[in-house]
Amino acid sequence: MRSTYALTVGTLLIGSAAADSPVPGVVQWQIEKRQSAVSPLLQKRADTYEEVITNERMRGGYFATCAIGTPFQNLTLQLDTGSSDIWVPDVTAEACQASRSNPKGCTFGTFDPNKSSSFVDVGKGTFSISYVDGTHSKGDYFADKFEIGGAVVNVTMGLGIDTDIAYGLVGVGYALNEAIVAGTQSASSAYPNLPVTMQREGLINTIAYSLWLNDLDANTGNILFGGIDTAKYKGDLTRIQIYQDDRTGAFTSFLVALTSVEAVSPSGNDTLTSRQFPIPVVLDSGTTLSYLPADLAMQIWKEVGAIYSSELQLAVIPCSMASSAGVFTFGFAGPNGPRISVDMTELVLPLTSGEAPKFTGGPYKGQGACEFGIQNFSSDPFLLGDTFLRSAYVVYDLVNNEVGIAPTDFNSTTSNIVAFPSYGAQMPSATAAPSQSQVTARPSVTTPGYVASAGFSETATASAGGSGGGSSSAGGSQGTGKNAGSRAPPFDFARVVVVGVCMVFVSVGSGAFLLI
Ligand SMILES: *[C@@H]1O[C@H](CO)[C@@H](O)[C@H](O)[C@H]1NC(C)=O
Ligand SMILES: *[C@@H]1O[C@H](CO)[C@@H](O)[C@H](O)[C@H]1NC(C)=O
Ligand SMILES: *[C@@H]1O[C@H](CO)[C@@H](O)[C@H](O)[C@H]1NC(C)=O
Ligand SMILES: *[C@@H]1O[C@H](CO)[C@@H](O)[C@H](O)[C@H]1NC(C)=O
Ligand SMILES: *[C@@H]1O[C@H](CO)[C@@H](O)[C@H](O)[C@H]1NC(C)=O
Ligand SMILES: *[C@@H]1O[C@H](CO)[C@@H](O)[C@H](O)[C@H]1NC(C)=O
């Protein structure tokens, strides 16, 4: 059945249910409302829209403030590149009723269709989405006014009547990854989702957007529809190809080729290896951590001295390692492709909302325990989530099926927005990775010498001072790499209640990954 995707993909984005054109001026009126000083005479048709996204650390994701219906109902929704439907919790949803485990209900807002005069139910009982982490949302598809970043469109969305998630999502992936496509097993049931609708209604020129998540310690980043912001990255923006699903030939997710990982520290560098290189990885803003093949994850854990906790089913690490001098450099699209360095500040996350739980035994006895940003996964899809994406500026071009990637400029306060000039235009200010054709080359699998390991236990400030050799300033983690993957209980599990910091919002059952 899924092979039909390949046949229809070419026509999909121009076929199917066209949304009504909005009244010209509706959007401009909205912009004017937000920027009341701007004279209507000075307004031209906008070609990019920027929405601030807030890092809700205890919810494990980035959230945008959106408005739906007539009059607008405000909802805060998680932005997700790993799925393709917008859905909102219905006011009657079980997950939104105050209960003992959830005393405040849906604090990010619910949607009440009865209170929107522009609400149209377009598919009773046809909305059903499940995510890789086991959560779900089910109900109706509906069409209504939707506002994000000052742009207003009439778009199809899911109404989560039966859901175990206390907030909705804005999925901005390929239309072919919509839940309805998986549900009907038919590409022709795809509808124009948010990015497609914004392009069709002339708000943006092509189906593309850029995502800047910024530092873990900063609260906000942004999504820019229709353009790139050249002031938000350093060095060159490199275009790499997105991979088609090899079973169907369709583009369904932001799957790219991870072709190298290097551990770099003051004590030396290690090229890490995996039987799975080149590794297909999904760039997924809806996933908190990153998930790599076990052989590669084990090498990374060994470099930093992370320990696998079988109770938590997570690799954990002393919180003090956030100031480690080491970095991991991820290479994409073959030799001379773009490289993104991720430092340890971005890879050490709190396990709980309060004080860190302490290791009660083993090499880190008495130290605070944190969650490590790179975990192991046994099979596809491997995911580069927020722990990786914060270090990269990423442009998603859904027409040319390319991703632009560059090292992020953390905390950049300037802006230089360049719009994609037309439908299908090549990404501005970007060059193609030079040897993408070589990504099928499989590097040999060797055991790293772990020369970088000692340097990971130096603090970043110490290394900036140029000191060499393995100090133990990161709290006794020196030489503990050999404990990586140990299953000994590292701390008193009874005290640890892991908060919802670990979301994996990649939809299940899409054309690319049929996991069920
Ligand atoms: C929005 O789209 C739906 C379905 O495409 C349509 O029935 C409805 O009238 C539209 N609403 C507005 C306000 O344009
Ligand atoms: C929704 O948000 C807007 C802008 O922040 C605000 O002006 C409005 O009062 C809010 N509406 C409701 C119903 O809270
Ligand atoms: C919305 O309206 C329907 C039909 O009139 C009614 O059955 C339902 O209870 C209403 N829902 C709410 C939350 O008021
Ligand atoms: C970015 O800003 C945050 C919050 O102000 C700060 O904690 C962090 O260190 C900054 N990051 C960089 C790389 O300067
Ligand atoms: C390790 O890699 C870094 C960054 O790529 C480079 O500057 C440094 O020279 C390398 N060190 C060694 C010993 O190769
Ligand atoms: C991750 O690694 C640990 C330790 O080797 C193993 O017990 C666990 O099953 C692995 N998890 C996955 C999802 O592969």
Image (cartoon, rainbow, N blue to C red):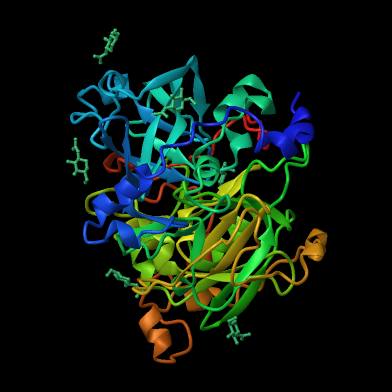
Residue 186, above or below 171: above
- In which quarter of the view is residue 247 placed? top right
x, y percent for residue 267: 54, 83
Quadrant holding the N terminus: top right
Determine if residue 296 is in view.
yes
Q: Residue furthest front?
A: 41
Quadrant observed for ligand 1 in the rendered image: top left
Of 178 and 468, which appears nearest the observer?
Answer: 178
Q: Is residue 391 left or right of residue 100?
A: right
Of 131 and 15, which appears nearest the observer?
Answer: 15
x 26%, y 61%: residue: 38
Determine if residue 262 is in view.
no
x, y percent for residue 25: 37, 45
Q: Is residue 325 left or right of residue 192?
A: left
x, y percent for residue 366: 29, 60
x, y percent for residue 315: 47, 52
Residue 33, above or below 10: below
Of 232 and 93, which appears nearest the observer?
Answer: 232
Q: Is residue 470 left or right of residue 95?
A: right
x 77%, y 42%: residue: 246
Figure label count: 0
Quadrant holding the C terminus: top right
- In which quarter of the view is residue 429 placed? bottom right
